[in-house]
Amino acid sequence: MKEIKIAFIGAGSMAEAMISGITESRTVKRENIYVTNRTNRERREELVLKYGIQAMHTEELPYEEMDAFILAMKPKDAEKAMKPLKEKIQPEQTILSVLAGISNQFIEACLHGGQQVIRVMPNTSSMIGESATALSPSPNVSMENVWMAEELMASIGKVFVIKETQMDLFTGIAGSGPAYFYYLMESIEKTAEENGMDPEMARKAGAQTILGAAKMMMSREETPAQLRENVTSPNGTTAAGLEAFKFNGGGHAIAQAILSAAERSKEMSEQLEEAILVK
Ligand SMILES: NC(=O)C1=CN([C@@H]2O[C@H](COP(=O)(O)OP(=O)(O)OC[C@H]3O[C@@H](n4cnc5c(N)ncnc54)[C@H](OP(=O)(O)O)[C@@H]3O)[C@@H](O)[C@H]2O)C=CC1
Ligand SMILES: O=C(O)[C@@H]1CCC=N1
């Protein structure tokens, strides 16, 4: 990747996860990564110490020097956040927005018509370069800027270029997805502890089991159903476990988690964008 300067507008957990992955991959020089927020000076200082990047108040950023901005404030703060940015960001500068539920159209309406906007949905596994990240470029984004965004996001994990209409569902599957597996692990640890097993050992065994299953699905030709059948001996332990899983609504619970998260993403779009897009 050619040498670029990027600035995170927002310094929270998502920004940090991406900064961690990008600095680890050395895709962008540390001194060319900027992060800003409005109030939390300690947070800025913490990120400088941890990652050797540049941090400053949003008003102090040298906007004209940036090749790309990553919007990483909360969706509810988006409109207010972009008001002062309109006069500081040029239409040809690239905006990568990780804001759940916020559309490219909304960002163009807040900034400039024809703004180079790419909607991005990463997850916190960016922290270790293992994100599942979706990209949905606005129609007028140049191929050069799409390639830059793809290369930048490839430094934090796997990249999937999708239609923006699929972004709500992708958010439900992968943006929020890590939380479902963390919740699964909480149940594994609790069950172990309640039955006399060291929960720390259960966590390590459970995490290795999830990691192994994930790597099997990424490296083998078999479908998940075939891989599941390979585990399931007739009338054995797995058959008993899966029967209980299905009887207690396991598959339905996962489907409902994904669809509820996707619905919330859609709802956030409707709630937050109505005022601007109706104007
Ligand atoms: N957490 C996750 O797993 C994922 C989150 N996302 C998205 O990432 C975004 C950030 O989420 P998350 O990191 O969890 O949120 P946080 O609340 O942790 O961070 C938000 C950050 O934005 C800053 N901020 C708020 N308003 C402004 C502003 N006007 N200018 C500059 N900085 C501002 C806040 O600092 P201050 O108040 O000091 O300005 C804070 O540093 C959200 O839109 C979320 O939908 C997407 C995928 C996954
Ligand atoms: O919970 C949220 O809204 C953010 C977006 C996807 C993951 N976390």
Image: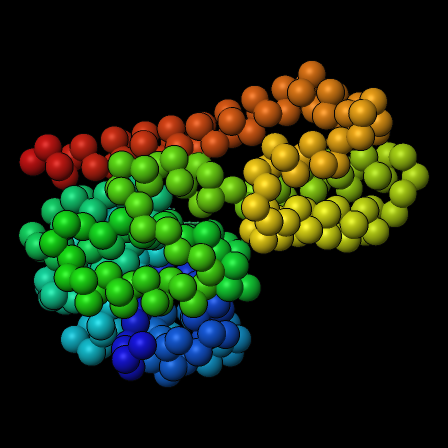
Nearest to the observer: residue 76 or residue 72: 72
Asked whether residue 126 appears in the rendered view, the answer is: no
Would residue 233 be found to the left or right of residue 252 on screen? right
| Residue farthest toward the right in the current orientation of the protein | 196
Q: Where is residue 260 drawn, in percent x and y? A: 45, 28
Nearest to the observer: residue 95 or residue 53: 95
Would residue 214 be found to the left or right of residue 69 on screen? right
| Relative height, residue 241 to residue 176 (above, below) | above
In percent of the image, x 47 and y 74: which residue is there? Answer: 25
In percent of the image, x 56 and y 42: which residue is there? Answer: 179
Would residue 58 be found to the left or right of residue 91 on screen? right
In percent of the image, x 61 and y 32: which residue is there? Answer: 225
* Res 38 quadrant in image: bottom left
Asked whether residue 174 appears in the rendered view, the answer is: yes
| Relative height, residue 104 to residue 125 (above, below) | above
Q: Where is residue 268 drawn, in percent x and y? A: 32, 34
The C terminus sits in image quarter: top left
The type of colouring in the image is rainbow
Would residue 221 be found to the left or right of residue 204 on screen? left
